[in-house]
Amino acid sequence: MSAGRILVVDDEPQIRRILRTALTGSGYEVDDARSGEQALEKVREFRPDLVLLDINMPGIGGLSACQAIRADTTIAIIMLTVRNSEEDKVRALDAGADDFVTKPFSTPELLARIRAALRRVPVSVQSSSARLELGRLVIDFVARTVHNGGVVSHLTPKELELLRYLTQHANQAVSHRELLQAVWGPDYGDQVDYLRVFIRSLRKKIEVNPDKPVFITTEPWVGYRFNLPEGHN
């Protein structure tokens, strides 16, 4: 039984061959594409559960391909990049990616990211509201959108789960490890720098000034806290 269908998109034939071998050996069905344009065709034909998408490709490029895939589907997307700057990672999340992996990466690391991206945290109806209104900020967990004044932003599945977990534990300091394992699973726990990228991306969507956050604040040496006004349910 297949563990899932994965589309590998990279302009380097050697990378496609290596990834196809590793993923097939782990039980996934695999197809590949050499460009963003071809990837969009393969998404329609192959109907993958997850896309591994290189950020630097000729043609429309990885970021544009990611935006196009995300506009029509909720397929999990992991972007592959050779750069390790936080800004590039945030750009990948802004384009709609669920995650990012920096080349060169190990096979176990990539497989852990794939498992986490395919993992969907079940929603507890009792412990979560469908909509949270905080003045100019409106978070719609069903539509996966954030209305911040006149700006509407879409949340990736992992951003949605992270924000939901924080709001379910509002006004509490939630540790890095607890957040990572609740949202990404048991393979995670010590990746504080990794979590910071997702928090930065969320702050860009929900804060008036992301550099001076009001809602998602840092608990030094501990984790993060989502602040609800007193008396707000």
Image: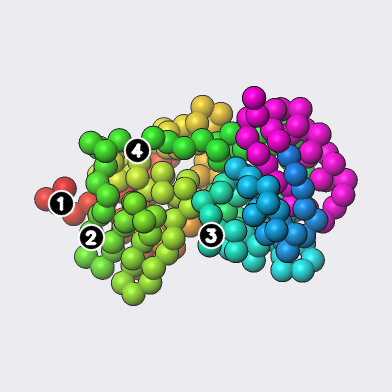
User: Distance of mark 4 from mark 2, alpha carbons?
Assistant: 22 Å
> What crowding class fits label 4: few (fewer than 14 Cα within 10 Å), some (14-19), or many (20 or more)?
few
> Tag 1 or tag 4, which sits nearer the N-term?
4
* In front: label 2 or label 3: 3
* Quarter of the N terminus within the rendering: top right
> Tag 1 or tag 3, which sits nearer the N-term?
3
> What crowding class fits label 2: few (fewer than 14 Cα within 10 Å), some (14-19), or many (20 or more)?
few
Tell me, for residue 232, which label it has, or none.
1
User: Distance of mark 1 from mark 2, alpha carbons?
Assistant: 9 Å
User: Distance of mark 3 from mark 1, alpha carbons?
Assistant: 35 Å
* In-front residue for pair 80/88: 80
Q: Residue furthest bottom?
A: 150
**Marks 2 & 3, CB-CB < 8 Å contact:** no
x then y, percent, for residue 126: 23, 36
* In-front residue for pair 186/178: 186
Residue placed under numbered mark 3 in the picture: 72
Residue 167 in view: yes
User: Distance of mark 4 from mark 1, alpha carbons?
Assistant: 21 Å
Identified by mark 4, the residue type is Val
User: Distance of mark 2 from mark 3, alpha carbons?
Assistant: 29 Å
Residue placed under numbered mark 2 in the picture: 134
> Tag 3 or tag 2, which sits nearer the N-term?
3
Could you tell me which secondary element the residue under label 1 belongs to?
Answer: loop
Residue placed under numbered mark 4 in the picture: 123
The magenta segment is 1-29
Q: Residue at x 50, y 44 (%)?
A: 195
Identified by mark 2, the residue type is Leu
Q: Residue at x 68, y 47 (%)?
A: 46
